[in-house]
Image (cartoon, grey):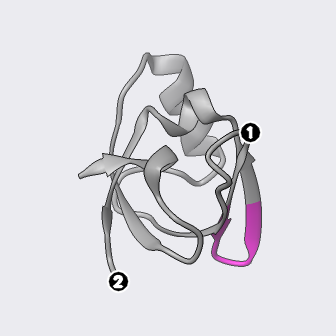
Amino acid sequence: MMPLSLCRNGDEVEVVEILGGRGIRERLFEMGIYPGVKVFIVNNSYHGPIVIALNSARVALGRGIAEKIFVKPLN
């Protein structure tokens, strides 16, 4: 398990856990990010936002939020 912020471009991962308060978890849930969801890393340059693909949508996450999302690699 590792934070989403450490994933590389092209990685496919599954969300395992989200650390943080109720507000951040609810916000991510509304965006479709919750434990069990598979995401694809579109762009992570290790500084600035991380772009992920969720189904057919692309979502940009700030690095601070990405560090609170723990994932496991699928590929």
The residue closer to the viewer here, 26 or 62, is: 62
Q: Main secondary structure of the magenta part?
A: strand
Disc 1: which residue = 48
- Identify the residue at horizontal 76%, vertical 64% (top origin): 58
Residue 33 in the image: state x and y as whole percent. 53, 51
User: Residue beneath label 2, please?
Assistant: 75
| Residue positioned 57% across, 31% down in the render | 65
Q: Is residue 73 magenta?
A: no
Is residue 64 or residue 48 the one in the foreground?
48
Q: Is residue 69 left or right of residue 58?
A: left
* First in sequence: mark 2 vs mark 1: 1
For the magenta stretch, what is the residue range?
Answer: 52-58
Residue at the front extreme of this rendering: 46
Question: Residue furthest toward the left?
Answer: 1
Give x and y (percent) for residue 16: 29, 52
Camera-side residue of 48 and 4:
48
